[in-house]
Amino acid sequence: MSERPAVSASSRLRALLRHNETGLLGILVLITLIAAVAVPSFSSSGNPTEILDNASLVVIVAVGEYLVIVTRQIDLSTAATLGLSAYLIGELVGGLHVGVLGPVVGIVASLGLGAVLGLFNGLLVERVKMPAIIATLATLSIYSGLQVVATHGSQLYADQLPSWLANIVSESWIGLSPLVWAAVAVTVVVALVGRRTSWGRDLYAMGSNPEAARYLGIRTSRRTYQVFAACGALAGFAGLLYAGQYGNVDATAGNGFELTAIAAAVIGGVSLFGGSGTAFGAALGGLLLTEIENILALLKISIFAQQTLQGAAIVVAVAGYALISRRLDRPTRRQLGTAEDRGDSSAQAGSVPSAAQELRA
């Protein structure tokens, strides 16, 4: 019995450097070091904590977007879901007197409300057959309208919230606020589910080759409902945390958050073409984007420049991925062309089973 050859340290290093997350982490460290030297207020007391707290909500919603985008869909309604959940669930837990069960009630209610709103997105996409970008653009308007109706033009203030939620930013567990720990927990759980379960592998199969996924017997309709519900649930949970972090919640809460979350996921390596990306990448993208916005704010650069940055980042990330994909596809296309020139009819006839076998492997 032959022994497997030992893997050299240099080979392991090269394999590690090929991961998108490694490059993102390197960029994050580099920007942090440059900002610490060039922007004195960047390292001032409280600013690193503020970056982590602000990044937490972006990370949670971006991880939810990762689940949808990896199946070759998109959800533009996350900001409205977040805002509606922030007001309704904040008002709910503020009016309840359930003692130590308050956090449990708040978390379950926010996840449930978000999941229902996400399921409606899935219904429009799967049952009505609307393109996801149109369906979720429509529900963005619907949920935003419901947010205006629910608030009645008023605000939800911090003193109306229970102490466990109103003090969520001031609390600290091992130097980090509950907001950060919530983002870490969401990222780890979704990453494990996405990479270590058959459910997660089904999502990648749907995004990589929908026809082959159906050939394999994957229940693509059910998975579509599930990913939209999961994305909505995480947006709803982020809404609960939003209420605790900012205190004042009105009809504009969460406006524009969907672009930030999508930009974070795309910067983190989640391909808008589907089938590629990780939860950790989306989380790192959210942290990187938040840190850059913080630096721009410290430099007193206009908010419009930050929005321009987000849009430019999406364009660069998508264009870069498309270029890489085309370059990787060239050898395959040349092989298929050679096979067709030889009259090899099996090259096309077996394309779906071949792709299906690759996805199953």
Image (tube, rainbow, N blue to C red):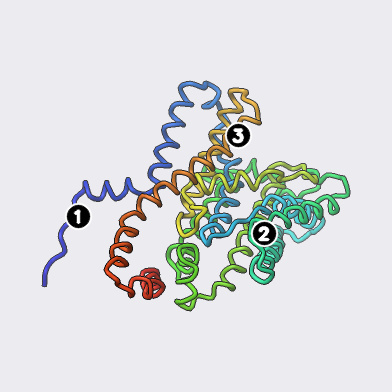
Q: Nearer the viewer, residue 344 or 16?
A: 344
What residue did someone put label 3 on?
308
Q: Which mark is residue 7?
A: 1
Q: CA distance from mark 1 to mark 2?
A: 45 Å
- Give the x, y percent position of residue 99: 73, 59
Which badge, 1 or 3, is on the more N-terminal residue? 1
Residue type, label 1: Val
Instruction: Give how far apart the Cα atoms at labels 1 and 3 are.
Output: 45 Å
**Residue 135 in sight from this viewpoint:** yes
**Number of residue marks:** 3
**Element at badge 3?**
helix
Label ID, residue 347: none
Is label 1 in a helix, a strand or a loop?
A: loop
Q: Specify the quadrant of the image occupied by residue 159.
A: top right
Q: Are marks 1 and 2 in contact (CB under 8 Å)?
A: no
User: At x 28% / y 63%, what residue is drawn?
Assistant: 338
Q: Amino acid at mark 3?
A: Thr
Q: Is residue 208 left or right of residue 45?
A: left
Whether tag 2 and tag 3 are in contact, CB under 8 A, the answer is no
